[in-house]
Image: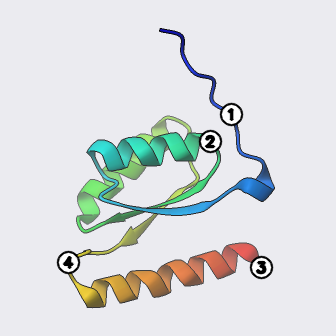
């Protein structure tokens, strides 16, 4: 089966994407593929150690447009804190 070509996203089409559970499995694979396309990816995870391992793995493959957001999707306060942190990061990057 032929490999599909990966197309880089034009700057005006670049998205900021938060993926929860992105330190492993489908979430990690999605984060990697979207980052390779040029999108800014935020990894939302509970476990700092696993998250750092995921970011290191992506960085080792030359993928640097990934950052972390610590959050627990079962905790309303954690979600609110992550929302505020993400909003601040997005506003700073747009300045």
State which mark lies toward you, 2 or 3: 2
Q: Residue furthest top?
A: 1
Q: How many marks?
A: 4
First in sequence, mark 3 or 4: give its number. Answer: 4
Q: Is residue 72 left or right of residue 31?
A: left
State the residue in front, 59 or 9.
Answer: 9
Is mark 1 in CB contact (under 8 Å) with mark 4?
no
First in sequence, mark 2 or 3: give its number. Answer: 2
| Crowdedness near tag 2: few (<14), some (14–19) or many (≥20) residues, C-alpha within 10 Å | some
**For mark 1, what is the residue?**
7
**For mark 2, what is the residue?**
37
Give the SS element for disc 2: loop
Give the SS element for disc 3: loop
Is mark 2 in CB contact (under 8 Å) with mark 1?
yes
Say which residue appears at 25% left-offset and 55% top-offset.
50
**For mark 3, what is the residue?**
95
Q: Residue furthest left?
A: 74
First in sequence, mark 1 or 3: give its number. Answer: 1
Give the SS element for disc 1: loop
- Residue 45 % position (x, y): 30, 65
In the figure, 82 relative to 18: above or below? below
First in sequence, mark 2 or 1: give its number. Answer: 1
- Residue 27 % position (x, y): 34, 50
Give the SS element for disc 4: loop
Q: Which mark is residue 74?
A: 4
Say which residue appears at 78% left-offset and 48% top-offset.
10
Res 63 visible: no
For the C terminus, give its image quadrant. Answer: bottom right
């Amino acid at each position: 089966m032929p490999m599909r070509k990966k197309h880089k996203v034009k700057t005006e089409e670049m998205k900021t994407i938060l993926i929860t559970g992105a330190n492993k499995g489908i979430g990690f694979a999605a984060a990697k593929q979207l980052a390779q396309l040029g999108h800014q990816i935020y990894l939302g995870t509970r476990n700092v150690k696993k998250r750092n391992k995921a970011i290191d793995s992506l960085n080792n493959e030359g993928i640097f447009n990934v950052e972390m957001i610590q959050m627990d999707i079962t905790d309303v306060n954690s979600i609110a804190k992550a929302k505020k942190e993400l909003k601040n990061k997005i506003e700073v990057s747009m300045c």
